[in-house]
């Protein structure tokens, strides 16, 4: 990892390879390590930048609320430092929310956008209540709340098959500081609905959904991209496509990057 100072905090990122730039943005309770099976494949043709988002991995917290715009500005700061003019953003879950905020703020820098197990919709009122409950739970029993949250992201059918991967994801999630967890939950809770951006933007876009995603309703999210130029990829499993559908995911990403 490399480090850069930003607003009296440290941002962590990695930068490797040559060619068109791809920026990988992890999800909530994740960090740049989640891409470890995908980066080597893409490095053969692309320059890959992985960012630890605010309050995650080795990137420090900025405050008690990290909005998606705050996170997007931090990503932009890194890309400006690296003198990258055009990038393809690939964001998993919360990373997708950050990618959408970035695309709205810095549309001229976008060569392509992938929302992976993510959505352009804002939180429903029910989801906001659930985030408040999750904040309370992690304050009361940090380890138990995180372990349960991570396991619940996988489809039920995969929890035995991917036991080793789930344990690894839990260990990484437990490196996330309490402040980072709360600040991200508060930021996701107040994020904007950005479905319009998918309709009006000209750059290539892809939405990857799991039919058994416990977090995102498949039919609901599939519906809002109907009639758009968004490429829809549907997998049979849950929220963690980089584990549950790794081989197919890599093939779809390679195909999409060729049109960006």
Image (cartoon, grey):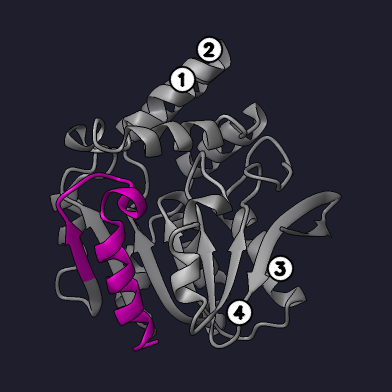
The residue at 47%/16% (across/down) is 144
* Coordinates of residue 136 in the picture (x, y in percent): 51, 17
Above or below 125: residue 31:
below
Image quarter (top left, top right, bottom left or bottom right) of the N terminus:
bottom right
Residue under pointer 3: 78
Residue under pointer 4: 17
The residue at 46%/20% (across/down) is 145
Residue under pointer 1: 145
Q: Are marks 3 and 1 in contact (CB under 8 Å)?
A: no
Q: Are marks 4 and 1 in contact (CB under 8 Å)?
A: no
The residue at 38%/82% (across/down) is 257
**Mark 3 to mark 1: distance in Å?**
32 Å
**Mark 3 to mark 4: distance in Å?**
16 Å
Q: Which residues are magenta?
A: 232-260
- Name the mark nearer the viewer: 3 or 4: 4
Q: Earlier in the sequence, mark 3 or mark 2?
A: 3
Residue under pointer 2: 141
Q: Are marks 2 and 1 in contact (CB under 8 Å)?
A: yes
Residue 135 makes an appearance in the image: yes
């Amino acid at each position: 990892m490399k480090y850069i100072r930003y607003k009296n905090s440290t941002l962590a990122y990695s930068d490797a390879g040559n060619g068109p730039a791809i920026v990988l943005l992890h999800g909530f309770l994740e960090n740049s390590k989640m891409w470890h099976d995908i980066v080597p494949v893409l490095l053969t043709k692309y320059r890959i930048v992985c960012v630890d988002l605010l309050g995650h991995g080795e990137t420090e917290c900025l405050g008690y609320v990290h909005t998606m715009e705050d996170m997007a500005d931090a990503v932009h700061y890194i890309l400006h430092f690296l003198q990258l003019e055009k990038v393809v953003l690939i964001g998993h879950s919360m990373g997708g929310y950050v990618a959408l905020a970035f695309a709205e703020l810095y549309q001229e820098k976008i060569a392509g956008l992938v929302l992976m197990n993510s959505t352009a919709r804002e939180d429903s009122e029910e989801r906001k209540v659930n985030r408040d409950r999750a904040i309370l739970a992690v304050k009361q029993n940090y380890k138990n709340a995180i372990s349960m949250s991570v396991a619940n992201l996988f489809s039920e059918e995969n929890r035995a098959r991917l036991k080793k991967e789930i344990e690894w994801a839990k260990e990484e999630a437990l490196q996330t500081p309490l402040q980072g967890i709360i600040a991200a939950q508060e930021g996701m809770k107040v994020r904007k609905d950005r479905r319009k951006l998918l309709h009006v933007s000209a750059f290539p876009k892809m939405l990857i959904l799991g039919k058994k995603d416990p977090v995102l309703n498949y039919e609901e999210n599939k519906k809002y991209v109907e009639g758009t130029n968004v490429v829809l990829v549907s997998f049979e499993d849950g929220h963690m496509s980089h584990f549950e559908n790794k081989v197919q995911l890599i093939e779809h990403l390679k195909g999409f990057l060729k049109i960006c």
